[in-house]
Image (cartoon, grey):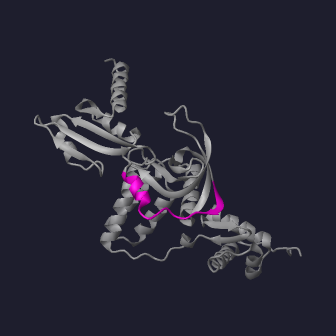
Amino acid sequence: MTDAPERPFGKRDRLARMLRVVAVLRGHPEGIRPAEIARRVGVATRTVYRDLTALEQEVGVAVWSENGLWGVIDDEFLPPLKLTLDEAMAVVLSARLMVRYADKYDPDLAAAFEKLEEVLPAALAEHVERTLDILARHPRDAAFSEHVHRLTRAWAERRVVTLEYEPARYAPEAAARKAVVRPYLIEPSLQTHALYLIGWDETRDGLRTFKIERIRDVALTPRRFDPPEPGSLEEALRGAWDIIADQPSTAVALRFAPAVASRVMETTWHPTQRVESGADGSLVWRATVAGTIEIRLWILSWGDEVEVLEPAALRDDVAATHRRAAALNGG
């Protein structure tokens, strides 16, 4: 049996038809075949395939397909959220923090701001509008946004993904590789102003951290995975200085000069930190962190006001970095 010839659809007809397709998808959370959608909507099957593609690529509705069945992500359409004025302000401030540290335009963050703006009092709405103006000046990166969307979908559906990943330039021994990953978490970093995927790398049989900007391609597989044991991911991240939790635990000891000791004590920099004040006003700071890649940058930011006591390899690295900096700057 072949599809019957179709009459041309106007824009309004096409929109109404696509809304009906979405309604059918939502009514079948287990999935439905395009031929059955076509029968219910009253169009050719090939039109349904075009509409499914348009829903994802043009409208931004996240659909899934597996074994011939199609569906829409359960959380694609969330119920209305009622917020008090103080709760809405808390959301605005959280998003403002994201805007300050983001280095790319985030269409989903912009859409969330626009919805908030509609329901806020004038004074707060003007604040949101200024935030949207700032966000609009950020550069666009369509590939990055698409990768975030696919990873978010995989995270929400607990689906395994395949990645093509480019290593960091500071690790010349690492080569570009493919990875099969169970996405556990997408996390922003205040230190690098970037987004990271944290998940179980089946290729390396361990928890790994992937900077999303270095992902060259990502594809969802039909395979599902069970979530990690409750609390296990949080416990692993507890050792991270910022994002990286897949490095060996390392005991770090630092001595801060009296001039900055009080500033260091004002903040809890890491959940494992321990401090000890010296008779001369200095401060010995200790913590156990996952590797030294991230804490190294924090140590260097204190210049000559901090001395690395341990580990020895980190002390040597910081000293060599300062020597190179002095030579580069004419010291």
Q: Which residue lies furthest to the left in this view?
A: 279
In the rendered image, residue 90, in percent from the top left (x then y), is placed at: 33, 65
Side (left or right) of 293 relative to 274: right
Q: Is residue 130 visible?
A: no
Q: How many labels were placed on the picture? A: 0
Q: Can residue 194 be seen in this view?
A: yes
Quadrant location of the N terminus? bottom right
What's the residue at 37%, 29% (across, down)?
Answer: 317
State which quadrant residue 304 falls in. Answer: top left
Q: In this view, does 258 lie above or below 144?
A: above
Q: Which of these two is toward me, 114 or 252?
A: 252
Side (left or right) of 205 relative to 329: right
What's the residue at 37%, 53% (across, down)?
Answer: 238
Side (left or right) of 278 relative to 289: left
Q: Give the range drawn in magenta.
A: 219-238
In the rendered image, residue 11, in percent from the top left (x then y), is placed at: 68, 71
Q: Which residue lies furthest to the right in this view?
A: 1
State which quadrant residue 192 falls in. Answer: top left
In the rendered image, residue 135, in percent from the top left (x then y), is placed at: 44, 53
Quadrant location of the C terminus? top left
What's the residue at 59%, 58% (across, down)?
Answer: 150
Side (left or right) of 23 relative to 85: right
Q: Is residue 316 above or below residue 51?
A: above
Please check the rendered image and state whether residue 228 is part of the magenta-colored stretch, yes or no: yes
What's the residue at 34%, 60% (across, down)?
Answer: 93
In the rendered image, residue 20, in percent from the top left (x then y), is placed at: 66, 78
Please check the rendered image and state whether residue 86 is part of the magenta-colored stretch, yes or no: no
